[in-house]
Image (cartoon, helix red, strand yellow):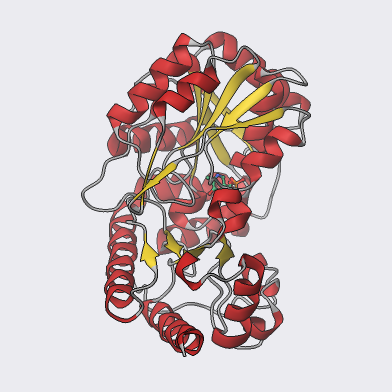
Amino acid sequence: MYDFTKSSDRSNTGAIKHDFAPEPVKGSGFIPMTVADTEFPAPPAVNEAVKRAADHGCYGYTYADKAYMDAVAGWQKRRHSWDIDPDWYVVTNGVVQALGIAVRAFTEKGDSVLLQSPVYFPFYGAIEDNGRVIVDSPLVNVNGRYEMDFSDLEEKCARPEVKLMLLCSPHNPIGRVWTEDELKKVAGIARRHGVTVVSDEIHNDLIMPGYGHTVFATIDPDNCIVCTAVSKTFNLAGLSCSNIFVPNAELREKFKKEAHTSGCGCVPYIARFATIAAYNECEDWLTELIAVIDGNFRFMKRFIAERLPRLVLTELEGTYLAWIDARAYGMDHEAMSKFLAENALIADNDGAMFGKNGEGFRRWNIAVPRSELEGALVRLEKALKTLEK
Ligand SMILES: Cc1ncc(COP(=O)(O)O)c(C=O)c1O
């Protein structure tokens, strides 16, 4: 049994979530619920491996050696029934970096790239900051559950200027784990219209009980790249290391060339040790983490149903990011952020940052000790009640 009831004080460690929290929250001692890292220390076996790496004392250039690739491939096989050829592998210093590389590798300036809003906000930057055009196929909110609009997706992929699709799978911020059936439809549409798929599967290990993740490459290996990492699963985002797989040789050549131009090539030294330990020794820790997140979500769902019925909570199928519809309060999204920080000492994410259709929603990172989540919900209730008078 691991202890997920405590968090360590991360203030003044450079932690973005803590040190950049709005002032009233920063001074409060409460944990912000923004940036997608967790408040739980990495598994003990990872921490031991990192200490051994530091004890060695040489922090030189490091590559994805056999021990590393065996750990990565073993994990994908055990957890995702996915057989990886080590040749497919490309290292990047993060999935966001890989998204930008993919956009530059597979499209030309002025081409269009499809995304599905509301979506993790750096998807927008990966397209626009590289001089490409965003084409949005918005997800549809059906009674609080989001679905893809396949006829809209087909119509947009059929546009000759659309060359690439950024798929978020599982989807941040709306917590869907796309079914195999849904992904097969996406694969079919993309194929029919010559659109390459970048499948961002960074949340692929954080799947709630009753749901199952399908790796996009198990459906159409020749028309995709798959982005994975240890970062979300084991709280290792600060180690800046992602494992990207490009099964198709032609796509891989293009991706590798652009990755090289962007300065990628080495596995960060500490990340190598952490990844090997995480993937080889920490499956039991992950099982417990998922139970903690699922328990937090169930608790939050009950609380909201019983005490804050004007809020609508989307079912969490994957990730540790809860998506709350607060539109019933009719408050402008920026005013809501200010109100929550000042009156409830809550820092969360304004849904508008994930797209226009995220306006009126809030994203809560619930990978926190239960006591913190409960405290935040109680403060939220108290603050929202003042609006109802
Ligand atoms: C969907 C998604 N992709 C990528 C990232 C960030 O990846 P990285 O830190 O590896 O750049 C996040 C972080 O929240 C995410 O949710």
Q: Is residue 387 left or right of residue 23?
A: left
Q: Position of residue 309 (x, y in %)?
A: 33, 74
Is residue 46 depicted above or below 251 in this figure? Answer: below
Out of 77 and 100, give the one closest to the viewer. Answer: 100
Query: Which quarter of the picture shows residue 359?
Result: bottom right
- Identify the residue at image location x=34%, y=62%: 289
**Which of these two is toward me, 147 or 268?**
147
The one nearer the camera, 44 or 12, is 12
Q: Nearer the viewer, residue 120 or 40?
A: 120
Tell me where residue 169 appears, x and y as whole percent: 43, 38
Q: Is residue 374 visible?
A: yes
Q: Residue at x 77, y 25 (%)?
A: 261
**Residue 238 visible in rendering:** no
Relative horizontal placement of residue 282, taking residue 8 as reference (left or right): left
Image quarter (top left, top right, bottom left or bottom right) of the N terminus: bottom left
Left or right: 229 in relation to 79: right
Residue 371 place in picture, x, y as percent: 38, 83
Q: Residue at x 46, y 40 (%)?
A: 139
- Looking at the image, how many numbered discs can be counted on the residues? 0
Residue 273 placement (x, y as % from top left): 52, 48
Q: Where 362 falls versus 19 (above or below)?
A: above
